[in-house]
Image (cartoon, grey):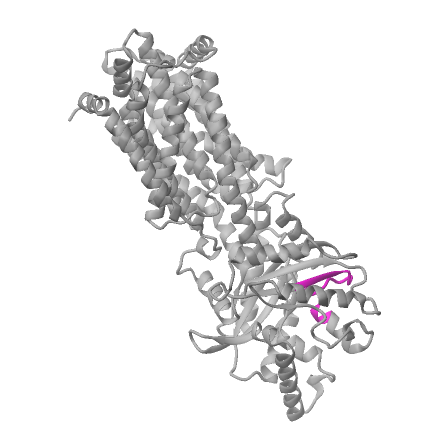
Amino acid sequence: MNLNSVVDGLIKWRYPMLALALLLACSAAVVSQNLRFDRSVENMFPADSPLLVSYHKLKRTFGGNEIVLAVYEDDQLFATDGQGIRRLRALRERLEAVPGVKAVLSVDLPLPGDLIVNNNPLSRRTRELFEGYTHNADGNTASLVCMLQPKNRASVPRRETVDGIRDIMHSLPEPLQNGQITGEPVLVVDGFRYVENDGARLGRWSAMLLGLTIILCFRSLRWVMIPIAIVEMSLLLTNGILALLEIQLSMVSSMLTAVVMVVGVATMVHVILRFRESRELGLSTEESLRRTCRLLLIPITWACITDAVGFLALTVSSVGPVQDYGIMMAIGSLMVLLSLVLILPGAALLGRIDLDPRSPWGEAGLADHLQGLLQTVVHHPRALVAGLVGVTGFLMWGISFLDVETDFTRNFRADSDIAKAYNYVEDELGGAGVCDIVIPAPERLDWPFLEQVREMQLELREGEESLAGVTKSFSLADAVIELSPVDLSKQPGPLRSGLTQTGLAAMRGWMPVFFDAMYSLDPETNQKYFRVMLRVQERQSSQQKQALIDRLEDISKKRFEGAEVTGYFVLLTHLIDSVLRDQWRTFLVAVIGIGGVMWIALRSLRLALIALIPNALPILIVLGGMGWASHFFWPELKINMGTAMIAAVSMGLSIDSSIHYMFAFQRARREGLSVSESLERVQHNVGKAMVLSTLALIVGFTVLSTSRFVPTVYFGVLVSLAMCGALAGNLLVLPALLSIFERRRSTT
């Protein structure tokens, strides 16, 4: 079946296909109701990751391990009249009543009544012991450790529990103030709340801005509604397929709607310009559509395939949400093609009102500028390419200055509740990071084991500079030794052993939930484990964090065989540290994959390589410029999850214009035109569409800059910059390379 037969069939069966599109959209809308969010940080890692194995052991052994810190200020916290402690106790009781909260640890618990405020040695030692966990060094900030029920045993969803705790902390009685909450559950709940809200809001704004762009360019309501219908159907089909495949939305999914919107509208810009061009040639509406489909169906098909390949390159990332996003967007790109085929013929020819799009304002001036640009390029192609190579080489050097954003809370805007809360805890409690050392323990704790743990903790507290990030360590060994009425190390063996068991029994009886969170049985292996909790500084470089984790592993394994360092701090450090590595791996896969598709589409390895160059270089220039900026005047500019995706995504999106350019160039050459004549025709016809489609892309991605999730902001801004660079590459570098190599080939 040839192209003309396919186009004739699309036009002949346009109304049944329009009905089929409506049926598919309705079906997909029903199925997509089952689409769910994956609200688990663990699923950012492969299931067999050693990091995840250790973390799951921590969670199942110590009762879920999900903790929310509820923090507030009270200048009279340790007032000798006991007012501050009584306020703390009342607040603790309110928090314990929140559904989903298993227990709450606070500084009033270790000693009965109000004894904690006394000035005797035991009270002072107790305050010092829990300092950094239940209160700060100045004694004017309290922290209540809310231990949550495991998800499979909680009576309410985690979001309700977190919101219940937040409501209490945001409505503190006088004189308490500055109530904040932090912790892994808060990070996850708030993060996905932002993502869900962003998804709906960004979708609406993308539709409005892109619709406004088309109206301003073409001044036709019909040709605004067609792209929007195609995009909406693409989204419904994508969500329906994701639901059927049981693929869940993730933390970067807020970009799904906006990116599908941009791909669909940018594709339709080429269609609208070709259709209007055909109408200006005097063809009927149906013949104009037939000509447009003959000219664009193959380039658009290959463009959507290269989009999908670019997105699929993200699946080689080691970060779960990035992998998922690649799959989602690959499906979305292909659904744009399917929706276009089903909707465009019927919608373009339905009725007789507003059939023709208008000419974009400034079109004649744009065409003149493009031709003037081309003349400069074809007269000095080698100088242009040489200059580009020099500029690219210099800017690429800046890539070496790129650093990874290691503070996961910086994925949220500085004015968000979660960012402010984590900054407060970092400043007041000595660090917002929490990690754990999990040690295989004997069936019955004894003095030799506790003494060995204590010695390890002393080494952590008083160790070398690489351990400076550890601000506090705590375990049952601290509690038994510090709260003992006598110095256990100086007692005779039998007496010391008895006092140790008495202390452990007292701790278990007085705070049973806390005791089980520090020493418990792994139900899978029936092995007892002992836990050392560490508070660490979050504001460290990725190198410092990794060095700290490595040193903790060395120290713990030197004393205890089978000891593991795990926890949220460890997971996020490894997650963020893989981002930079993934950036280049996904980019390389995208270049190879898209290059292969271009080779097949153009049937020429030489032309495929020529097409890749103007699309790959802008990405390197943008990332290099980002590195130079961070090195000289913007140190806060660092790589995050959004940055990790831009290389592969930009490559997939920008190559669309090159495909249209190259197909039009090949068509002109087959018609017998010279290289210069072919370039002039392509620059006039395709160049305008490239400019307007890139404008649509940038307008759509600009919406992402309003997101509350910072990786989404970075993604939108950096992809927009890369798109601008790719436009310049396709209007300058691509014709320069074609002028050099195609002329040489023609001469040969």
Between residue 526 and residue 237, name the one nearer to us.
237
Q: Is residue 95 above or below residue 202?
A: below
Question: What is the quadrant of the C terminus in the image?
Answer: top left
- Residue 135 in magenta? yes
Q: Nearer the viewer, residue 14 or 145?
A: 14
Considering the image in quadrants, where does the N terminus appear?
top left
Please tell me whether residue 304 is drawn above or below residue 324 in the rendered image.
Answer: above
Where residue 427 sits in the image (x, y, percent)? 70, 54
* Residue 490 image position (x, y, % from top left): 71, 86
Q: Is residue 389 visible?
A: no
Q: Which residues are magenta?
A: 128-144
Which corner quadrant of the image does residue 293 belong to?
Answer: top left
Q: How many tags in the picture? A: 0
Q: Compared to 46, does 672 lie above or below?
A: above
Question: Residue shown at 58%/56% (left/top)?
Answer: 162
Q: Position of residue 536 (x, y in %)?
A: 63, 60
Q: Is residue 577 above or below residue 620?
A: below
Looking at the image, the residue that sits furthest to the right is: 81
Q: Is residue 241 magenta?
A: no
Is 678 placed left or right of 95 in the picture? left
Residue 673 falls in image quadrant: top left
Image coords of residue 170 (percent x, y) = 68, 53
Q: Identify which residue, 391 or 572, lies in the foreground.
A: 572
Side of 597 where 458 appears, left or right: right
Residue located 67% across and 87% down the image:
499
| Camera-side residue of 41 and 457 | 41
